[in-house]
Amino acid sequence: MENNKKIIFERIDNACRACGRDPAELRVVWVSKTHPVSAVETAIVIGAVEFGENRVQEALEKFLPQREGIICRIIGPVQKNKLRKAVSVAQAIDSVADLESVLKLEVLCEEANKNLEVLFQVNASEEATKSGLSMQSAFDFLQSLPEPKRLIYKGLMTIGKNTGNPKDSKICFSFLRNLRDKIFNSEAKFSNFTELSMGMTDDLEVAIAEGSTMLRIGTALFGERNLKTHP
Ligand SMILES: *Cc1c(COP(=O)(O)O)cnc(C)c1O
C-alpha cells in the first residue's frame, strides 16, 4: 500500500504541475469500501486521515468507535432510514441530493449535538445508473435550501463519465466547478461552499485540471475490489 500511495501522490504532483496548481489545495479521500478494517489500519499508519465508504453498514463496522483525528465520509446514496446511523459514524455525507434528507439530517444532528458537512451530488454524466441532482435542477434546488443550522453546506460531488476515456469526464467536471462558483457567490448560507469532490483512480488528472479539491481514490490505493463479493 505504501508504494501505491507513492505512485498516487506522484500522479497528483504531476497533474498539479501540468496546470499550475499547488498540491496542498487537494485532499485525498481513501475509498476503503469492500476492504477490511485491517486495510484501514494500514492506511492510517502510512498517513491516511480521510476515508470514504459508500455503505453505512460497512462504515459502522470499520469506523466505530471513532479514532482520534480520523474522518469518515459517506460517499454513496443513503436511504432515509439509514441517515441516523450515518450521522453516528460520519463527519461528512457527500451524496445528499434531496430536501427530505437535508431536513432529516438537521433534526438528527441537533439530537446528536453535532455538526455535519454535506456535499450535494450532481449526476453530471447524466447516466441513468447514477444518483444525484440533475444538471438542469441542481442550481434551483441548491438556491431553495433552508438556512443551515447543524449542517455545513460544503460543496458538490460528482462521478465522472465511466466510458473508459477519462477525457469524457472533463465536461462533467467543468460543469461542477461553474455551479460551485455560482452557488458560492450567491448567498451567505453558502459561505463555506468551496469543495469539489471529483476525480477517482482513472480520471484524477482531468479532475485536477478542472479544479477538484477532493479526490476519491479506491483502487489505486487499496487494490482491486472483489467484485464477486461486492458487485
Ligand atoms: C468506489 C468509489 C470511488 C473510488 O473509485 P476508484 O475507481 O476505485 O478509485 C469513488 N467515488 C465513489 C462515489 C465510489 O463509489
Image (spheres, grey):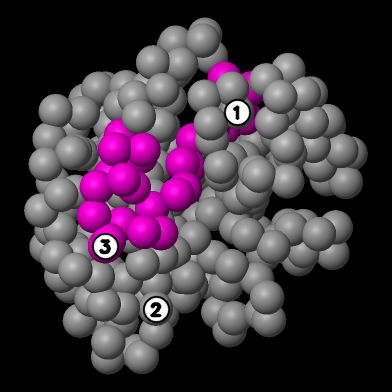
- Circle 1 sits on which residue? 208
Q: Position of residue 106 (x, y in %)?
A: 23, 76
Separation (CA) of disc 2 from disc 3: 15 Å
Q: Earlier in the sequence, mark 3 or mark 1?
A: 3
Separation (CA) of disc 3 from disc 1: 26 Å
The relative height of residue 8 versus residue 116 in the rendered view (above or below) is above
Local secondary structure at mark 1: helix
3 vs 1, front mark: 3
Residue shown at the point (39%, 78%) measured from the top left: 115
Q: Earlier in the sequence, mark 2 or mark 1?
A: 2
Separation (CA) of disc 2 from disc 1: 28 Å
- Circle 2 sits on which residue? 115
Q: Badges 2 and 3: C-beta atoms under 8 Å apart?
A: no
The relative height of residue 49 versus residue 164 in the rendered view (above or below) is below
Specify the quadrant that holds the C terminus. top left
Viewer-side residue, 72 vs 114: 114
Q: Position of residue 77 (x, y in %)?
A: 31, 51
Residue 198 covered by magenta stretch? yes
- Circle 3 sits on which residue? 189
**Is residue 61 visible from the viewing direction of this image?**
yes
- Few, some or many residues within 10 Å of mark 3 (<14, 14–19, 20+): some
Give the magenta-colored segment's residue range: 179-206
- Please name the amino acid that badge 2 sits on: Asn
2 vs 3, front mark: 3
Local secondary structure at mark 3: helix
Local secondary structure at mark 2: loop
- Please name the amino acid that badge 3 sits on: Lys
Q: Position of residue 155 (x, y in %)?
A: 38, 49
